[in-house]
Amino acid sequence: MTTDMSFMGLVLQASAIVQFVMLLLLAASVASWAIIFRKRTMLKQAIASSDEFESGFWSGGDLIGIYREITGAGDSAANMAGIFEAGFREFKRLTTQPGIEADRVLDGAQRAMRVAQMRETDRLEESLATLATIGSTSPYVGLFGTVWGIMNSFRGLGNVQSATLAMVAPGIAEALIATAMGLFAAIPAVIAYNRYADQVSRLEVRYDTFAQEFSTILQRYAHTKQGSGAKD
């Protein structure tokens, strides 16, 4: 009896456990690529949005004008613009309260920016853990399928008196497909995770740097406003 040694033939002839492993790895690969394309778009937009906002912010625009432009857009601001909006909104709210000290105003604005920054970072890091999990576990899942397939092949040899390579080749080949599928799922996930984790870390540094610099601007503004209020 001739054994179908094509890829699909080996998959269809594999044992139920090996087929389950292959199906699991295929699902992991599809999920991984879906995350990769989605995160690529998200991070690309985050970087472009931050570049655009920084360019406008440091060009010397009025803070109130920038705030009105962001809030007038309708949608909730994200990325660096969202951090600015949260900090300046809290700053405006606190400065309208009579008798509040400048340091308390600044602390409130900084807390608001930290919360916005943490939310944005959490949004950017979403699904990165899934990529890391797929990248680290897929080779072992594929190896399990390989070991199981080879074990079945050698178990079948115990029922015959003379073994030939043709008898064990299909079983070993179908088992090795599981290893190949494990690597196929793991390698893109690992590469994407390392790349995206680096981009997220760089964005976090940019957000933190902007928050610190913006806090300095607000500090000067708060003390100047308090000083002018005291003179009045």
Image (tube, helix red, strand yellow):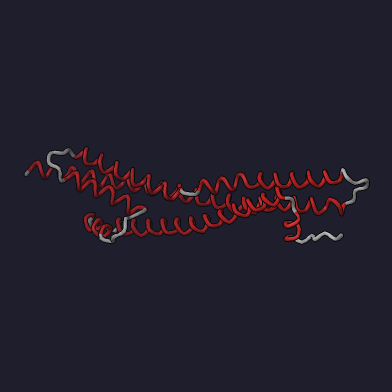
Residue at 19%, 43% (x, y): give it. 94
How far from the left and from the top, in percent, is residue 173?
78, 53
| Placement of the N terminus among the 4 image quadrants | bottom right
How far from the left and from the top, in percent, is residue 68?
23, 58
68 on left or right of 80 = left
- Number of numbered tags placed on the structure image: 0
The residue positioned farthest toward the right in the image shown: 161
Q: Quadrant of residue 215?
A: top left
Between residues 153 and 65, which one lies in front from this camera angle?
Answer: 153
Residue at 72%, 53% (x, y): give it. 177
202 on left or right of 62 = right
| Placement of the C terminus among the 4 image quadrants | top left
The residue positioned farthest toward the left in the image shown: 232
How far from the left and from the top, in percent, is residue 116?
34, 47
How far from the left and from the top, in percent, is residue 110?
29, 42
Between residues 29 and 224, which one lies in front from this camera angle?
Answer: 29
Q: Quadrant of residue 61?
A: bottom left
2 on left or right of 12 = right
